[in-house]
Image (spheres, rainbow, N blue to C red):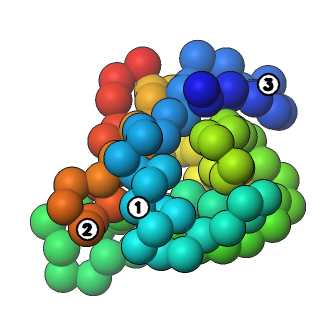
Amino acid sequence: MDANIFRNGVTGMELTVTPAALACFRDEWAFGDGEQVRVFVRYVSGAEEPFALGITRDTPQEAGLVTAAGPLTFFMESKDLWFLDGGSLQIDCEGENIVFRVGPR
């Protein structure tokens, strides 16, 4: 079960991780119990959209959105929350690929 924690006055946003994504992080990407996964905004040169989401192992500095999914903790730093525009983010897995689904407020 995901438990969203909002910091810095952020409300109404949601970060969820599907069971398929959690299995992918553990089995395919070798994330272990207790690890933290940062979701961040990155510039994508030459793509249809100029920005996309990425993931990395990291420790929160100023987490704005945090959720626990099984033994892993997923978070976004406050500086990256603009990308969600007050909406939600679902992290899923299709095949061997992690997929980000940004939803409306």
Assign the C terminus to one quadrant of the image.
top left
Q: Nearer the viewer, residue 75 or 69?
A: 69
Disc 1 marks a residue whose amino acid type is Cys
Residue at point 45%, 27% (across, down): 87
The tag earlier along the polypeptide, 1 or 3, is: 3
Q: Are marks 1 and 2 in contact (CB under 8 Å)?
A: yes
Residue at point 19%, 61% (across, down): 95
Distance Cα–Cα, label 1 vs label 2 = 7 Å
Residue at point 44%, 55% (across, down): 23
Q: Nearer the viewer, residue 98 or 23?
A: 23
The tag earlier along the polypeptide, 2 or 3, is: 3
Task: Give the image location of residue 31, x and y in percent.
Answer: 60, 69
Distance Cα–Cα, label 1 vs label 3 = 32 Å
* Residue 9 numbered mark, or none: 3
Residue extending farthest bottom = 45
Mark 1 Cα-neighbour bin, 10 Å: few <14, some 14–19, many ≥20: many
The tag earlier along the polypeptide, 1 or 2, is: 1
Disc 2 marks a residue whose amino acid type is Glu
Query: SS class of the residue under badge 2?
Result: loop
Asked which quadrant contains residue 43, the reply is: bottom left
Query: In the displayed structure, would residue 2 be above or below residue 17?
Result: above
Asked which quadrant contains residue 4, the reply is: top right
The residue wearing badge 2 is: 96
Query: SS class of the residue under badge 1?
Result: helix
Distance Cα–Cα, label 2 vs label 3 = 35 Å
Task: Give the image location of residue 83, x and y in percent.
Answer: 47, 47
Assign the N terminus to one quadrant of the image.
top right
